[in-house]
Image: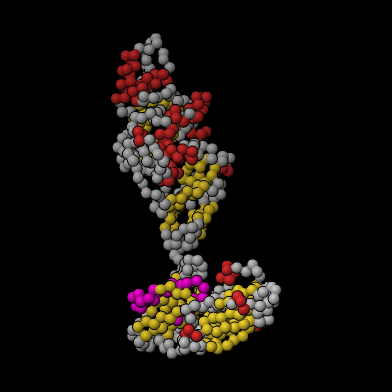
Amino acid sequence: MVPLHWCLLWLLLPLSSRTQKLPTRDEELFQMQIRDKAFFHDSSVIPDGAEISSYLFRDTPKRYFFVVEEDNTPLSVTVTPCDAPLEWKLSLQELPEEASGEGSGDPEPLEQQRQQIINEEGTELFSYKGNDVEYFISSSSPSGLYQLELLSTEKDTHFKVYATTTPDSDQPYPELPYDPRVDVTSLGRTTVTLAWKPSPTASLLKQPIQYCVVINKEHNFKSLCAVEAKLSADDAFMMAPKPGLDFSPFDFAHFGFPSENSGKERSFLAKPSPKLGRHVYSRPKVDIQKICIGNKNIFTVSDLKPDTQYYFDVFVANSNSNMSTAYVGTFARTKEEAKQKTVELKDGKVTDVFVKRKGAKFLRFAPVSSHQKVTFFIHSCLDAVQIQVRRDGKLLLSQNVEGVRQFQLRGKPKAKYLIRLKGHKKGASMLKILATTRPSKQPFPSLPEDTRIKGFDKLRTCSSATVAWLGTQDRNKFCIYKKEVDDSYNDDQKRREQNQCLGPDTRKKSEKVLCKYFHSQNLQKAVTTETIKGLLPGKSYLLDVYVIGHGGHSVKYQSKVVKTRKFC
């Protein structure tokens, strides 16, 4: 009599143009089959104890077969959908009692039996429809030819199948703990901390495992296979192979199956061969992140957006086989940004404001009495700041401010003003602001357009330096200060000391040179000079001029570094 597995080989010839000997747990053959993964590609036979990846075209069913040679054999079949729901069913076809005729094999009985198996539907054992990882398991299965039929009605997709007749010893998928939920233990505006109970696979079975955390904004995932399908949507699904094509590992890399040399093949994926294609897929980039963290069972996700809902999944993967199991995922909404506190401005009172780099501050001014005009005085101490003023929601002003500026706006009875200050992209901003309906006396001193201090090189000596600066038509008080600095003093250091809002009260008394008043109705003559004496030869000095207004508020001119002569 012809052996059973040779009989079955002939029976399956019409079903697959490239079938092989029906796999059993012959260990030598099994190891050879596992090493040669391409051996199973596009094959109708499911190997015993190895997970295979394959594809489905929409509305095109696919069938797989495997044999159980003896009665009362344990059996487990696991199907993992990737990227789309599947419909699948498992059925059993009884084997004929007589496998062939006598002698070397009579083809007529074989032909009759082959047609008998193909034409009969068999007994349906299990069916499922959905995108969950589902399995069929039996502790005692009859011998026979088993058929697994799969269908995708939604779109072209791929999937994984694992079948084994030794489920108790294999245990290919990591186990979940008795409580498989992922918990959110801490929630912030941009961070979420997750925790889960460890898998018994590491502690009891002593198998190497790692956890992978997946974050996205759409939904939870049922399998790591579905996550990888999403992550590879941009480049892996560019080309879908034609049905019936003999696939090589390179073809499968095009269709989205992970390869051992995926990093090396990426350059080839960018330019797929036009001969492979059935459709060209164009998918948008997916907002999903996968982070594998080793065997830790607590993880903090950072750099999230405030007030945004995220979905979190945890997968435990066997580090040797790469087969994985999904925990029960969770979701959470990050906390809202702290609401901006609106600062109330009082009529005629100066308010100090600090604005973070690229940040914003909101101020509110609500005059208590009827008014015809509103005047805003703004003194930007460091970098430029953008100011926007709205009256009862209507935008009246939007400008960048450097130094001291004054804005006068038309008033309106019972009007309320909202001021928005936006910081500079280079650094933080400091400023003083005053809003008033009675601008009889300006609290800030008036300034010329040019606030530089000019040094006269020819008037330098070994112990003195002469400088000049501009004034205005208003009579103001000017104070000049000096400070010895190193020769290495540069523009960056000088810029750090350019806070114009820091007044003379922050300086040492020993640094003060003098204070004086001056002005001129003729702006061309509103210039004053001063010679600073008592300096040391060959030394560098930082000179600052402060102009002080009627309300005691001061503004600093741009600093100047001068150097005395070394030899006179």
In this rendering, the count of numbered labels is 0
Decide which of 393, 468 is in the foreground and name it.
468
Residue 331: quadrant of the picture: bottom left
Pinpoint residue 33: horizontal percent, then vertical percent. 48, 27
Q: Is residue 45 magenta?
A: no
Is residue 413 shown above or below 304?
Answer: below
Look at 47% across and 75% down and name the residue there.
Answer: 402
Q: Is residue 289 visible?
A: yes
Pinpoint residue 158: horizontal percent, then vertical percent. 38, 38
Pinpoint residue 515: horizontal percent, then vertical percent. 59, 86
Image-based side of 126 in relation to 489, left or right:
left
Q: Is residue 125 visible?
A: no
Q: Main secondary structure of the magenta part?
A: strand
Quadrant of the snapshot with the C terminus: bottom right
Decide which of 33, 208 is in the foreground and name it.
33
Image-based side of 7 in relation to 508, left or right:
left
Quadrant of the snapshot with the N terminus: top left
Q: How is the image coloured?
A: secondary structure
Is residue 221 shown above or below 70?
Answer: below
Task: Write down the region rendered in magenta.
Answer: 377-398
Image-based side of 35 in relation to 111, left or right:
right
Look at 38% across and 43% down and name the residue there.
Answer: 83
Pinpoint residue 257: horizontal percent, then vertical percent. 43, 38
Look at 68% across and 81% down and name the residue there.
Answer: 534
Decide which of 442, 191 is in the foreground and name it.
442
Look at 50% across and 66% down and name the residue there.
Answer: 426
Decide which of 155, 80 is in the foreground and name it.
155
Is residue 270 shown above or below 333?
Answer: above
Q: Is residue 379 magenta?
A: yes
